[in-house]
Amino acid sequence: MPGKLLKEAKLKKQILKIIFRHIPKETCTIFLFGSLAQNKAYPSSDIDIGIVRDQALKNSLLVKIKQELEQVKTLRDIDVVDFSSIQDKDFLKIALKEVKIWHQTSRSRLDLNNLKKLIAG
């Protein structure tokens, strides 16, 4: 088990490094969501990464991040979702039900809290 945790920590570090190459770390919350965050993953489950900021990412930037993440050596696909641009409240309720925060600042915490308030109300 310790070997598995080490691999997960290394993978998390690689993913964050790629994201922070394109987005200032002070401006965003990065989190794991989906089956891995809920500890219900199957071998075929992908790694779902959420990003929340005060403004949506440009589509070209999101594509660039996804392309770089494809180079990360893992047996799982990595999917990145810009939650700042999602309007579907049903998806948001399901996706944000259980998350594991990977990176957050006091400034970016407000963006995630505002998103949660939006879907609650």
Image: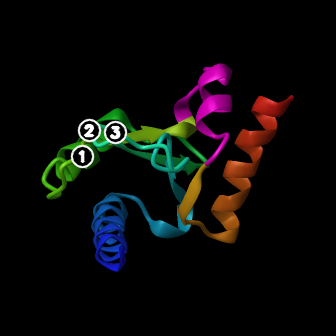
Which amino acid, by three-letter code, is at mark 3? Ser
Q: Which mark is residue 115?
A: none
Q: Are marks 1 and 3 in contact (CB under 8 Å)?
A: yes
Disc nearest the viewer among 2 and 1: 1
Question: Which residue in the protein does label 2 denote?
Answer: 63
Height in image: 33 above or below 88?
A: below
Relative side of 95 to 12, left or right? right
Element assignment for label 2: helix
Q: Residue at x 34, y 59 (%)?
A: 19
Q: Is residue 87 visible?
A: no
Q: Can you name the residue that lies furthest to the right here?
A: 121
Query: Which stretch appears magenta?
Result: 85-98
Numbered-mark total: 3
Disc nearest the viewer among 3 and 2: 3
Question: Which residue in the protein does label 1 denote?
Answer: 76
The answer for how far apart the CA atoms under marks 3 and 2 are is 21 Å
Coordinates of residue 103 in the picture (x, y in percent): 53, 67
Height in image: 7 above or below 118?
A: below
Question: Which residue in the protein does label 3 denote?
Answer: 45
Mark 1 or mark 3: name the one nearer the start of the chain: 3
